């Protein structure tokens, strides 16, 4: 990961001490980029960028911020995985580096703000367009890379982490509406954060600053069009092809790539596909909860590593590690994150950082493929309702009760959740049922 930050005066006036402000933001995000840091200031000092670099692509000439020689600059965090194809489309002879960052800059020159629709990857970036005097910022479709911003005394500030914005806030206060969201849903809605005055650029959104006006717009949304014209075998084959292609693109790097391997289905699929392309030098990393076998799944990870023939490094995670690390975990998170996974992830990442700069993982698989037990419970209720109403064959159901029933054994340990979810509101409106499923507030 890299770290980006910047500031622009909304009235185009020089920002007092702009250089020092950018340096402070860089210092607060130093952990995001150990391989280099730099700032860029406009000649009029009304706008400037800061960058901390973790070098992955173009180790020699990919330092940031990068300019185009005509006054436009970019500060970028992430990776555009199809940058090689885009570079060829844009005309590689005009490039001064081999970085994906310059591809993003040249893509904007060709397509304007529509450039994001050409990108496959994870990204958050800021781009100063000298010709139109516009600050253009964007975040990837799923919000993998972070982007936060605030406006104080007529100056718009942005950064990869909230902590880099705190020195400029008039006071550090809780955003009550953001806190309400978190207590109900375990995350904040609509770009809110738990810090008063600080907002998050939402996934799939653009932000522009022009003529003193800050404008935010959506450029991408998930749309589902059910396809009932193909067999299960067709979809299985398509998913396999897409997974293989995606992992192949994610392996594009000028440094060795490894993987997190919990032993679960998602990380095992990613690691097994990666090793097929990387060979026996491939490294994976896992954590062990050796104090209690009931919580230790590292054996599954070892079986996968042995089967595929790659090296697996592990770390023992104990209660003492929690005591010694939790303060650091909280500092790096900036705000609460539902679930305990950030703690073991922090320790396994510390192990991985000793050997690899880039590590693939299986996070997000449960969300995409409905892998959590609560999803199965919700599907099952809707299928029962459809069977009773005689609407199962109406085309509204992708998942059928015939496919769910053989998998109900997965709910063996979730009887209390079933009892609570079905305690009231059974077969109610689907929006109300969804809210009840995700609502964590006291009943």
Image (cartoon, rainbow, N blue to C red):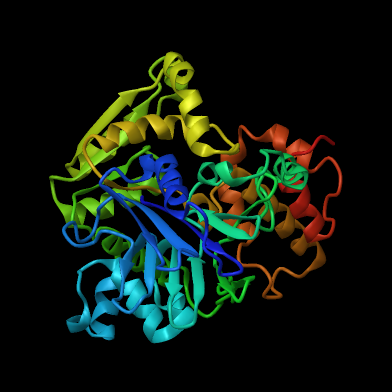
Q: Is residue 282 above or below residue 216?
A: above
Would residue 312 appear left or right of 234 to someone viewing this image?
left
Q: Position of residue 259 (x, y in %)?
A: 29, 45
Q: Position of residue 308 (x, y in %)?
A: 21, 45
Q: Nearer the viewer, residue 14 or 299?
A: 14
- Residue at horizontal 60%, vertical 44%? 373
Identify the image quadrant of residue 264.
top left
- Residue at horizontal 75%, vertical 44%? 439
Q: Is residue 146 above or below residue 67?
A: above
Q: Nearer the viewer, residue 5 or 438?
A: 5
Instruction: List the single residue furthest toward the left.
Output: 280
Quarter holding the C terminus?
top right
Would residue 223 appear left or right of 189 to someone viewing this image?
left
- Residue at horizontal 83%, vertical 50%? 426
Identify the image quadrant of residue 357.
top left
Identify the image quadrant of residue 418.
top right
Q: Nearer the viewer, residue 196 or 267?
A: 196
Q: Position of residue 245 (x, y in %)?
A: 30, 67
Q: Position of residue 103 (x, y in %)?
A: 30, 73
């Amino acid at each position: 990961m890299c770290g980006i930050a910047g500031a622009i005066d909304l009235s185009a006036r020089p920002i007092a001490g702009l250089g020092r402000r950018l340096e402070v933001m860089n210092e607060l995000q130093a952990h995001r980029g150990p391989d280099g840091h730099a700032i860029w200031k406009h000649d009029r000092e009304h706008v400037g960028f800061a960058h901390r670099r973790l070098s992955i692509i173009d180790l020699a000439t990919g330092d940031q911020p990068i300019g185009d020689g005509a006054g436009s600059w970019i500060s970028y965090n992430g990776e555009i995985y199809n940058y090689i194809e885009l570079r060829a489309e844009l005309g590689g002879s005009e490039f001064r580096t081999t970085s994906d960052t310059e591809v993003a800059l040249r893509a904007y020159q060709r397509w304007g703000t529509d450039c994001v629709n050409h990108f496959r990857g994870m990204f958050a970036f800021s781009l100063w367009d000298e010709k139109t005097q516009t600050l253009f910022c964007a975040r990837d479709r799923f919000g993998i890379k972070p982007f936060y911003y605030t406006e104080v005394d007529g100056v718009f500030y942005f950064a990869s982490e909230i902590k880099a914005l705190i020195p400029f806030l008039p006071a550090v206060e809780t955003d009550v509406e953001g806190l309400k969201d978190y207590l109900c849903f375990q995350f904040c809605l609509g770009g809110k954060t738990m810090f008063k005055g600080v907002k998050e650029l939402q996934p799939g959104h653009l932000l522009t600053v022009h003529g003193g006006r800050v404008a935010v717009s959506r450029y991408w949304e998930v749309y589902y069009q059910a396809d009932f014209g193909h067999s299960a075998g067709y979809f299985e084959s398509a998913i396999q092809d897409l997974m293989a292609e995606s992992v192949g693109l994610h392996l594009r790097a000028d440094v060795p790539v490894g993987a997190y391997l919990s032993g679960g289905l998602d990380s095992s699929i990613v690691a097994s596909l990666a090793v097929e392309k990387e060979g026996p030098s491939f490294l994976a990393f896992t954590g062990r909860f050796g104090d209690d076998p009931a919580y230790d799944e590292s054996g599954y990870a070892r079986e996968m590593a042995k089967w595929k023939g790659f090296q697996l490094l592990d770390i023992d995670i104990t209660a003492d590690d929690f005591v010694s690390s939790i303060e650091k975990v909280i500092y790096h998170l900036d705000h609460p994150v539902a679930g305990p996974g950030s703690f073991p992830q922090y320790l396994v990442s510390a192990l991985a950082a000793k050997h690899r700069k880039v590590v693939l993982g299986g996070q997000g698989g449960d969300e995409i493929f409905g892998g959590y037990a609560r999803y199965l419970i919700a599907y099952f209720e809707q299928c029962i309702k459809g069977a009773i109403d005689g609407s199962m064959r109406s085309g509204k159901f992708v998942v059928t009760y015939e496919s769910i029933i053989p998998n109900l054994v997965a709910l063996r340990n979730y009887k209390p959740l079933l009892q609570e979810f079905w305690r009231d509101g059974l077969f109610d409106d689907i929006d109300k049922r969804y809210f009840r499923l995700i609502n964590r507030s006291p009943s």
